[in-house]
Image: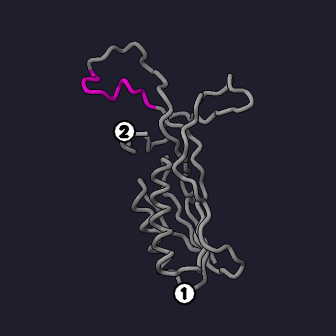
Amino acid sequence: MARLRPASAYRKQSQQPWARYSKRKPRKSYVRAKPYTRLLVFNMGKDIEDYDLTATLDTKEYIQLRSNAIESARLEANRYLATKIPENFYFKVLVYPHNVLREHKMGTTAGADRLSRGMIRAYGKAVSVAARLNEGQSLLMVKTRKGHEADVREALMRASKKLSGSYRVTFHS
């Protein structure tokens, strides 16, 4: 599945979400065929009771993130944590991309400004899925022991560089 438009075309939450996909009543679905998500792994590391420090990556604005961007951030943070503090962390992605993104393919070709305007507000086909995040909502969570604050902060900041928007790292004891 080729990515035709940049993420900035889908970043704002200005439109109504289209996430209705029903297996029991397919006639009532807004989405006929739901695209697959790139994000497949949500839990990494060891989940044990001994961790006394929790850090989260929180958004500073309303934003919509595509599944491939969240997967890229997950890979970056997990790779850094696995090299710096192996076997000493638990890492989790807290959101799931439900919102279906549509694209009208006719509008992406060369000379699209000269095409007919027959379907002015056409739905288009489903091309990707995205997660809608509110202001202050947590996206990623890391549990570890005290003393690893700098490594966790660096891992989450590296992950935030893969995402559009602005983020902050919050520590909870």
Could you say where residue 80 lies in the image, as x and y percent from the top left? Answer: 46, 73
Looking at the image, can residue 63 be seen? Answer: no
Amino acid type, residue under disc 2 in the picture: Arg
Looking at the image, can residue 18 be seen? Answer: yes
Instruction: Name the quadrant of the N terminus.
Output: top left
Up-down relation of residue 104 to residue 5 (above or below): above
Up-down relation of residue 164 to residue 85 (above or below): above
Q: Residues within 10 Å of mark 2 (few under 14, many from 20)?
A: few
Residue at label 2?
5
Q: Which residues are magenta?
A: 103-113
- Disc ID at residue 147: 1
* Location of residue 138 by image quarter: bottom right
- Disc ID at residue 6: none
Q: Is residue 104 magenta?
A: yes
Identify the residue at image location x=48%, y=47%: 66
Identify the residue at image location x=53%, y=61%: 58
Identify the residue at image location x=59%, y=80%: 88
Instruction: Name the quadrant of the C terminus.
Output: bottom right
Q: Nearer the viewer, residue 162 or 137?
A: 162
Could you say where residue 131 lies in the image, as x and y percent from the top left? Answer: 55, 47
